[in-house]
Amino acid sequence: MAVLAEWPLLLTGIAWTLALTAAAVVVGTLLGIGCAWVRGRGFGATLAPAWLQGLVGAYVELIRNTPFIVQLFFIFFGLPAAGFRLSAETASFIAMVVNLGAYATEIIRAGLEATPKGQMEAAHSLALTRSQTFVWVVLPPALKKVWPSLVSQIIIVMLGSSVCGQISTQELSYAADLIQTRTFRSFESFIVAGAIYLLLSIALRQFLNWAGAKFLFGRR
Amino acid sequence: MKFFSLSKRNVLLTLTTSVLLAATGAQAQNALDDILKSKVLKVAVQTDSAPYGFVGTDMKPIGLDIDMANYIGKKLGTAVELVPVVSASRIPALQTRKADLVIATLGKNPEREKVIDFTAAYSPFFQAVFGPKNVAVKSFADLAGKTVGVTRGAMEDQELAKVAPPTTDTKRFEDNNATIAAFAAGQVQFVALGASVAGNMMTKNPQLSSEYKLLLKESPNFVGVAKGEDKLKAKVNEIIAEAKKSGELDAMAKKWLGRPAGDLPI
């Protein structure tokens, strides 16, 4: 089949899609945890300075209320006018981190705010500091509660990376588009790309479900 | 877990079967009859390739290609419905029957001839590499290590791949507007574009101080028809031959390109 004959292109595409997703997941989730702490009632919202809360609030609303492709185009085509020229790959990475970070903030915040008060009081009575309480007592069960939604959001970001091909990042959709223009076999190109995305999504979901339980919040 | 892997195999089987089925689909040769019966000619045009096909101030497509579409429609005695496409979706528009004809700065090459048919040429066109005035480029070898923006699926993409050194970094974008935006933003050092498209870009963006560098290919525009639609192709060829004789093609070229159509291949 003409499409599968172009397997080096497809492999490069898969590698870029996975690399971008992996980097965006790590940085984006950390960003989300930080911002969720700032926004969470009973956490940063009572501790973080007002300007920081305002900043994080504006960031979350701005990103969650604009389309990903507009954010991406702004970073790649818009920012050079302000003197920031980023390669297509860096622009894609930043767009994905910024996008995932905003959604992760709200998802993780929901988990933080669901922490029973007694649990925090117990931590305080054991003389744990505020930061110890947050990292060891509050965060792990909070992540466990919201993990399925967070994993879904990560999958959405991975599938969303398909538009990064528009700015010439060589991810999977870019490969499929290129194969389609070379072979004129639209049906096969896109069904192969679709099947690969399907398998990647299933594999990534299984991996994250396993990794979350193993490394982040343990088995309880 | 067992049920899960089973269903995954089923999905793959379904996919493979549908691919095989699609490959054997037969196509009927009655496009011309259908057009004459419905009194509507669907023509795929580009809206990012001034002066061939672009959007006027009233947001309607105008240009040489649109004039050509209307001319053919008039000769057939049908209304013309314009179907906007980008470079990479021109040939799929024919394959999926979204359009009866493609009149969108479509050049002819052996790869394309395998999947669609071409009529006679109707307007001149050439593709070239453009870049900043302060960077000297004498031959394609000078493009080594440079980034060049092209529109994916355009003829420039294939032509550039043939002549540029392997270290040239080709960045592909969705349509001419995105390619031009990338060049204007400094994301690529050079662009390979159709000459008139680039001419338009340079007039609109004098701050880029860019100029013509290298000729890629002289490649006149043809009308694309779906593979095997010989009756439709013959009819359009008849109309083009007539327009050539009556001076209509020259008039169109003069109106939009500022020069006559010249010697066009059949």
Image: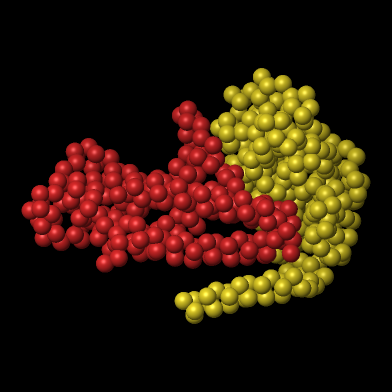
Q: Which residue lies furthest to the top in this view?
A: B134
Q: Let me know if residue B58 appears in the view.
A: no
Q: In yellow, which chain? A: B
Pick the front one: B44 or A179: A179
Q: Please state if B248 lies on the left or on the right of B69 as rendered.
A: right
Q: Chain A is drawn in which colour?
A: red
- Residue B42 location (% of width, % of height): 71, 60
Q: Disc count in the image?
A: 0
Q: Please state if A43 lies on the left or on the right of B13 as rendered.
A: left
> Where A194 falls versus A130 (above or below)?
below
Pick the front one: A171 or A131: A131
**Residue B250's quadrant in the figure?**
top right
Q: Let me know if residue B29 appears in the view.
A: yes
The residue drawn where x is 81% and y is 66% is B32
The residue drawn where x is 66% and y is 52% is A9
> Where B2 falls versus B31 (above or below)?
below
Q: Please state if B152 lies on the left or on the right of A42 as rendered.
A: right
The residue drawn where x is 88% and y is 55% is B237
